[in-house]
Image (cartoon, coloured by chain):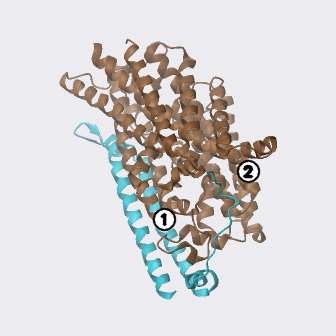
Amino acid sequence: MTSSRRGAPPVRQRTPATDLVEQTEVGELYLQGLLRAQLRLALTVLGVFAAALLAVPVLVTLVPATGAVSLAGVPLVWVLLGVLVYPAMVALAAWYAHQAGRLETRFSDVVGRDA
Amino acid sequence: MSGVLPGLAVLAVCVLTLVLGVFGLRLSRRTSDFYVAGRTVTPGRNAAAIGGEYLSAASFLGVAGLVYDTGVDALWYPIGYTAGYVVLLVLVAAPLRRSGAYTLPDFAEARLESRAVRHLCTVLVVFIGWLYLVPQFQGAGFTLRLVTGAPERLGATVVLVVVVLSVAAGGMRSITLVQAVQYWVKLTALAVPAGVIVAVWWATRGPLPQVDSSWLLPLTGEVPDRHHLYRTFSLLVALALGTTGLPHVVVRYYTNPDGAQARRTTVRVLWLLGMFYVVTIVYGVLGRAYLASSAEDWRADTVVLRLPAQVVDGVPADLLVAALAGGAFAAFLSTSSGLAVAVTGVLNQDVVRPLLAKVTGGDHSEVTGFRLAAVVAVLVPYGLSRFFPEVGLAAFVTLAFVVAASTFFPLLALGVWWPRLTVPGAAAGLLVGAVLATGAIGVTVLVGDRPGWAGALLAQPAAWTVPVALLTAVGVSLATPHRIPRGTRRTLVRLHTPESIPTGALGVPARR
């Protein structure tokens, strides 16, 4: 049995929630609210991330002495860029995933209640 | 070093890949199995599969080689490769899964309702996939020659045969299983020898890395007019944004059960990549303690494979080299088959299937088309790989990232978040990004990396090609507001609403 995604007829059902999001001003507002909130969260995370990453090369360019700082004989830049950056990325990603999930739960609750 | 043990290790990895591929064949029966594993893959296994697929020759051998060569500035490569998943997670992971499309061209068509944009994406997927496959074949060639003395082409041919057989046999279902296993094979094959080497180095009070301050200190590597800060920034842009648009990465997101799971998968991927890259850096640093770059037939990408023989003697060294050679082949095979599946998928849907329908009058099975496409998808870059100059693996792979960042990243980011994206806007963005990125790369390949601003801008173009492509897409879209796809609203509802709301309830076609 083989099947393709294309060519299959779209399945459409009409329910109160359909009309809510598709046809009413309120639904439009809910969706826009979700989109804006998610986008704001995404851009915040990306902004923090980019600033943190670029801080190292910018600082080293402006104050070259910072590149030579070392801890117990190991240059700090190597520790930062070689090891610590990875757990930091995991932590940021986990925080984002949690926040994005919360925004979606809130949206589901509101739409479910009004429909 | 004797070539018997490493040769056996390479053989074992190839056989393992094939056996898992055939095992998967029993399970894959329907077309959707061939493409996306029937969408029943758990986050744990999916994350390992993404890691297995993503960690290519460039990561397994190339990163250590670059760290050996250029020191602290090379650390930006693994950071960029990993940061790509943060960007992907934040901007597209969940919406991409919810789009319900199989491939990047599928996504473009679903979002923009345009066959023309779809075909443009098909061409780009094939181009990026082939660009990424060439260094995998080159790496396989020099690895097998170094560890066994085999002719240069043999390694590439082995990869070619194994990838075609396993992809054509099982499609994506088997590949998901194979990729997940390959990640752990790769990590073990890299981490265990690294542990032994560090232990011996520590116990014998081995030599300290022989380095100068330009290796040790950031942004001091070359003459000042090469614009280090710009190059670092632009490299980071290419790697961090390019990951989002790589065809073999994106295809993995369709195998998550839902959007939330897609996010969970990505967080795990970051764990897996971080563990791997920290280990590769060890090879680059200790390589500096034991290896001099004056050896005959030198190429920095071989540091990982040469290091064990310098630290220990006899059979233990052979065993470590065997593990590393096996791991390296796991890297070539897994990345190549991931790319092969992605390229095969779009070739089959947009080229082979229509052609076959014409030739046979529709009298052929769909699986035949998939297998035919698989052969084409792998044979072309295999043939091309002998004509490309041998540059560092990590630098070569970066070219694919630059093209992906300049084309698919704007398409995906705007497609997911911006309701006013139009068909001409998307097409113009893709075209401008593709032309600028390939143009800059082409000039650098032809005239070499020149000093000064012109050289820096052409050698690391992502910092300007990505914004130009984005602004083109936005500008043309604003100028053609009547060409906003009619279903934009419905598509965006589907991309952003959580699965806990029944899909039918939102008036959008049910997800498959």
Q: Which mark is residue B503?
A: none
* In this view, B92 is above or below B209: below
Residue at 52% across / 72% down in the picture? B497
Chain containing the residue with disc 1: A
The residue labelled by disc 2 is B119
Q: Which chain is brown?
A: B
Label 2: chain letter? B
Residue at point 66%, 28% (across, down): B384
Q: Give the residue drawn at x 35%, y 53%.
A: A88
What amino acid type should be assigned to the residue bearing mark 2? His
Q: Residue B279 at x, y = what percent?
A: 34, 36
Q: Chain A is shown in which shade?
A: cyan
Nearer-the-camera pick, B314 or B424: B314
Q: Quadrant of residue B428?
A: bottom right
Residue topped by disc 1: A42
B151 shown above or below B385: above
Give the camera-side residue of B372 and B52.
B372
Tell me if residue B246 can be seen. Answer: no
